[in-house]
Amino acid sequence: MRLVIQRCSQASVTVDGKTVSSIGKGLLILVGVETGDTVEDVKWLVGKTSALRIFDDENGVMNLSVTDVGGEILAVSQFTLTASTRKGNRPSYIRAAGHETAVPLYEEYCRLAGEAIGKEVQKGIFGADMKVALVNDGPVTIIIDSRIKE
């Protein structure tokens, strides 16, 4: 699984002109599920994202997690994170997991992340044409891949 984590002061998802989810201070997390990903990948990523120290402490040092600051999470499924650009200029999405794998792993990520931070995770609509708005705070953007684990 691949995540793009963006620290934000606000973020929202709109589908067909209607806002379906929004958060204030917290993390907008784009979630890409690849073929072969498992619940173990989900658990590892939840542990990383809920404890990732990317919020400022009283000294202006990034030393606090989303949990520490009482922040929220908005998780948006995004199969394009699995893109391979190795050949040519048209990305290949061959590594993207099918719905039968991706939906349950995305939902499990959201459920476990919510448990980890003590708040329900806001979500986009899986497979929908979403408009994602964000005010990236910093900007701070982190990419995590469960296969690389760095």
Image (cartoon, rainbow, N blue to C red):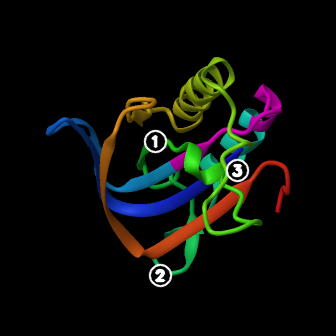
Work out whether mark 1 precedes mark 3 in sequence or the reverse, and give the earlier one.
Answer: 3
The answer, for residue 57, to whether it is visible in the render is no
Quarter of the image holding residue 1?
Answer: top right
Most distant residue in the left direction: 17
Per the image, label 3 sits on a secondary structure element best described as helix
Asked if the residue at tag 3 contacts the one at tag 2, i.e. Cβ–Cβ closer than 8 Å, the answer is no
Task: Give the structural element (helix, strand or loop) at label 1.
Answer: strand
Q: Nearer the viewer, residue 42 or 113?
A: 42
Q: Is residue 39 left or right of residue 110?
A: right
| Observer-nearest of 123 and 98 | 98
Residue depicted at 68% across the width and 39% down the height = 96
Is residue 34 depicted above or below 126 in this figure? below
Q: CA distance from mark 2 to mark 3?
A: 21 Å
Pointer 1 residue? 76
Q: Is residue 85 above or below residue 138?
A: above
Q: Where does the C terminus fall, quadrant-wise?
A: bottom right
Write down the residue under mark 3: 48
Q: CA distance from mark 1 to mark 3?
A: 17 Å
Residue 121: % across, % down? 44, 34
Is the residue marked by circle 1 packed among few (<14), some (14-19), or many (20+) residues within 10 Å?
many
Q: Which mark is residue 60?
A: 2
- x and y, in percent, of residue 73 in the image: 44, 44
Q: As shown in the figure, which amino acid type bears the numbered disc 2?
A: Gly
The percent position of residue 35, horizontal first and vertical second, equals 77, 34
- Which region is colored magenta? 30-41
47 in magenta: no
